[in-house]
Image (spheres, rainbow, N blue to C red):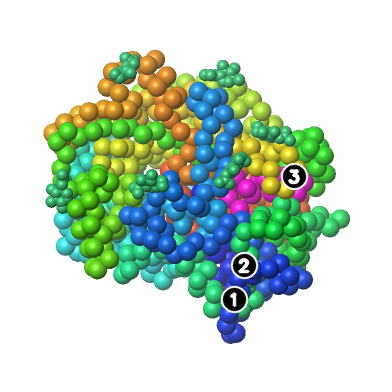
Amino acid sequence: MFQFFVLYLLVSRIGVAICAHVPRATILHHHDQLNAQYDFIIVGGASVLVLEYGPFDHHEDAVLVPGLLNLTSTPYWFNLTSTPQAHLQNRSFQVTIAAVVGGGTVINGMLFHRGAKADYDAWEELGAKGWNWDSLLPYFKTSETFTAPDAAFAREWDIEFKQHVHGNSGPIQASYPPYQFPVIKNFFQAFHDLGITTPKDPSDGSAHGVFWAPSTMDPVTRTRSYARIVHYDRVEQRPNYHILPMSAVTKVLFNDKKMAQGVRYLSRESGETYEVAAKKEVIMAAGAVHTPQILMLSGIGDGKELQKLGIGCISDLPGVGHNFQDHPTMFFINQFQKDLTPNADDLKDNATFQTEQLSLYRTQRQGAYTLVTDGGNTVAFIPLPNITSSTSSLLASAAAQNPKTIYPDAPASVLKGYSSQRALLIHHLSRGTISAQETAFNKGFLPLTLLHPFSRGKISINATTPLAPPLVDYRTLSDDTDLDIFLEILRFNRRLMLQEPLASLSPIEIAPGANITSDEQLRDALRGLVGPTFQHPCCTCAMVGREMGGVVEPVGLRVYGVRRLSVVDASLWPTIPGAHLMGSVYGVAERAADVIKRRHGLGR
Ligand SMILES: *[C@@H]1O[C@H](CO)[C@@H](O)[C@H](O)[C@H]1NC(C)=O
Ligand SMILES: *[C@@H]1O[C@H](CO)[C@@H](O)[C@H](O)[C@H]1NC(C)=O
Ligand SMILES: *[C@@H]1O[C@H](CO)[C@@H](O)[C@H](O)[C@H]1NC(C)=O
Ligand SMILES: *[C@@H]1O[C@H](CO)[C@@H](O)[C@H](O)[C@H]1NC(C)=O
Ligand SMILES: *[C@@H]1O[C@H](CO)[C@@H](O)[C@H](O)[C@H]1NC(C)=O
Ligand SMILES: *[C@@H]1O[C@H](CO)[C@@H](O)[C@H](O)[C@H]1NC(C)=O
Ligand SMILES: *[C@@H]1O[C@H](CO)[C@@H](O)[C@H](O)[C@H]1NC(C)=O
């Protein structure tokens, strides 16, 4: 869901670097307002043009006020459905990615943290030279301004942090909501009773245990801090920067030296097609679903597949669209018969509480509406050895799988990269250096998430018509290992409910249902309950070696085999980190901005 916002980092940085004096950026409304050419074109901002598929948001309450987010009614999703998922009872799913200026940051759960050190060290181990925890940490810090919680509140709720791993002058505001429901303490205690610890600060690379994550929230106004506001609204004061919303890029244009010359795009309002030139570079920030789609439409992908569609191949890169990853999720639903009050359900069904809390929010920026709807900021990221005693047998059976059987349509280079990913995953999962599961909690309705799936999906295209949707195949649970780990995740969370601090609330299990107990029943139930995504798509244009299925070279972030075309979004990552993705997307984009500016002599 983090589509188009990375570009704002680039916009702001490039914009700041080159246009230091004269004010005013331009939102274009008509295509004839475009310059003949720009230095940079960012798909998804010297002179910079950003082409964005979606509209601007309207700074409406549903975007700004954490507790008024409504994912059902938001108009900022792509209208896109996955292919039927063969291992999830052939169900199809909404592809939950955002179509709006600022991408997923406009409508996500605001959880702002980082994965574990080993999550990023794995990127380098897989061939992304120079990409590891130590080299990324400065960029994580550059991206944020961190505000500590009020001392008394932090004491009461045991919120700890380490100031030195956080930034103090970056664009995104990171702060803690000043309100919590009482049941949160029961959850923390129940996790602790199961031996799960709380790290001093999960953002220092130790992201395991049960902890508090900061929200992307302004500490004063207590409104969402997101890419549109902190990057676009900031560069609005700069010249030489144009943004054109409601514009779908359909093709990167190359000359006969395979040098990107610009892009072709279609106005979603008029249906007209236009072309615009880039003097220096075209930068892809369209997200893990649309970046590979646009590359394929432009002749970059598996040569044989492109030929079938009549697309002339410019760079034969079988990895484009492969290696698709996300965090499969199921909802473990419990009803507390003796719930504490107030609780998150009061925000749904207690009009008195709603009125009282909304008034508190409007007048004092306090209360339950500072917590994002259905979310909050309390999570547990837990390594496999801490949730099951079967770690070695689970991973032994993973090691015994033939990668070719799991991933039958992988081209040879992709399969080679995938095989090395499996070995590395097994290594880290067995040592507990990466987490296996997440439980997010603030009531009995718990999303349980598989953080490091062995299954891999694929983005492909079956048509060349400009607005034909890409085929999104998550292939969730195509490796049985993932289902087996999910079983252990569910069992662990059932044990959580049996711990006294939660058992005392008399939970009744609604889903999957307390009567579903045998392995076989659970496997069947999970295939019907697991969904393919936690809105965390990534890894479809990996920055690893070409011989390993790579699409982008890791040092300069340029697409192999062509010139003047780079990728800066989450499609670059070789493997998905065990974290909500936003923190990593901002960090990687800050670094990408540095890389691109440096090669054009634009400072830093
Ligand atoms: C969200 O929007 C949907 C559809 O408009 C509505 O049915 C639902 O009640 C809303 N949810 C909340 C929490 O307001
Ligand atoms: C979404 O796409 C489907 C199929 O392409 C179409 O029938 C439907 O009208 C679209 N919905 C919206 C709200 O655009
Ligand atoms: C899913 O669809 C495939 C192909 O149509 C079919 O062979 C299979 O039996 C279906 N599986 C289920 C669980 O319905
Ligand atoms: C996992 O278990 C080990 C061994 O008991 C313990 O040292 C570690 O703190 C636990 N990890 C978490 C995140 O709770
Ligand atoms: C609804 O909220 C009000 C105000 O917080 C509280 O006094 C009341 O007990 C709640 N009602 C129920 C049924 O929980
Ligand atoms: C592409 O696939 C979609 C979904 O499977 C299908 O509806 C559509 O007809 C296909 N288009 C072409 C040109 O094959
Ligand atoms: C479990 O209970 C539910 C609700 O009573 C029922 O629909 C379902 O068939 C039961 N499943 C099993 C495996 O007994």
Q: Which quadrant of the structure image shows residue 304?
A: top right
Q: Which residues are magenta?
A: 284-299
Residue 378, horizontal then vertical, whole percent: 29, 48
Q: How far is disc 1 from disc 3 in space, using C-alphas?
A: 33 Å
For the C terminus, the image quarter is: bottom right
Whether residue 549 is situated above or below residue 569 in the rendered picture: above
Residue at disc 3, CB closer than 8 Å to ligand 6: yes
Question: Which amino acid does the dot numbered 3 rest on?
Answer: Thr
Disc number for residue 465: 3
Do residues under tags 2 and 3 come within 8 Å of each other at their CB atoms?
no
Do residues under tags 2 and 1 come within 8 Å of each other at their CB atoms?
yes
Could you tell which of marks 2 and 3 lies nearer the N-terminus? 2
Image quadrant, ligand 4: top left
Q: Nearer the viewer, mark 1 or mark 3?
A: 3
Residue 560, horizontal then vertical, whole percent: 72, 50
Residue 210, horizontal then vertical, whole percent: 28, 44
Q: Which residue is mark 1?
A: 25
